[in-house]
Image (spheres, grey):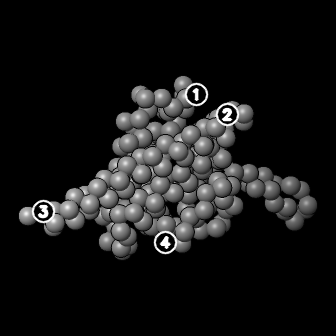
Amino acid sequence: MSTKIQKVDLALDVSSNIVVVLEVLSFVELLGKILKNKMKNNTGITLSEDVVLIVLKLLKTAPSYFNNVEKTFVEIVKDNKIDSSDMPNIIVLVQELYELIYKNKDTKLDSKKRGDACASTLKFLVHTLVEERIIEINKDKKTVFLSTTDKLIDSFFGLVNLHKELKNIKMCTKRFWW
């Protein structure tokens, strides 16, 4: 179940009275608006144009993935820490995102670029969850949480890329050994 985010916009009516307009967005809708530049991106994560296009397509074709990211990280921060019991859930998110991007027939990315696209996408999602206060992190711990999460995500995708590199090395060495 997706959390609804409330954004408050102020507008003046004809009689100069202030009217409060509530815009209720799901996480998927919020991401779509951010990526289409209708809302300011406060995450500090910059996505390339290619990655933005990939994520926009995934928002349409696989919105459940983004809801799973939200649900998973809401559960993870309930105990105010990321520990070893959270790793399997994060690994599932990493695997699902990699598979979604891999199966996307519109984009041709080599495994390194695919891993980088996945890492920046997942970091963007986590930063958005924190910056939009969908998951609550104490102000004094927010920087450490985001930094630790970024390192963790980079490590996971580093392993994905390492596996591909080792596979390529093995294939190259096979050619020299008959």
Q: Nearer the viewer, mark 4 or mark 3?
A: 3
Q: Position of residue 18 (x, y in %)?
A: 86, 55
Instruction: Please give the label number shown on residue 46.
Output: none
- Numbered disc 4: secondary structure: helix
- Of 166 and 80, nearer the camera is 166
Query: Can you tell which of label 2 and label 3 is closer to the viewer?
Result: 3
How far across and down, in percent of the image, does residue 93 sit?
A: 40, 46
**Label disc, if present, on residue 177 of the rendered structure:** 3
| Label 1 close to label 2 by CB (< 8 Å) | yes
Q: Is residue 171 left or right of residue 80?
A: left
Image mark count = 4
> What residue sits right under mark 2 in the picture?
141
Closer to us: mark 3 or mark 1? Answer: 3
Give whichever of discs 4 and 2 has the lower sequence position.
4
Amino acid carrying label 1: it is Asn
Query: Could you say where residue 80 lies in the image, as x and y percent from the top left?
Result: 58, 28
Mark 3 to mark 1 CA distance (whole Å): 52 Å
Q: Amino acid at mark 2?
A: Lys
Kind of residue at badge 3? Trp
The residue labelled by disc 1 is 80
Look at the numbered disc 3 and give the secondary structure of its residue.
loop
Q: CA distance from mark 1 to mark 2?
A: 9 Å
Identify which residue is drawn at 66% across, 47% down.
Answer: 131
Q: On the image, numbered disc 4 is attached to which residue?
A: 50
- To which quarter of the image does residue 42 belong? bottom right
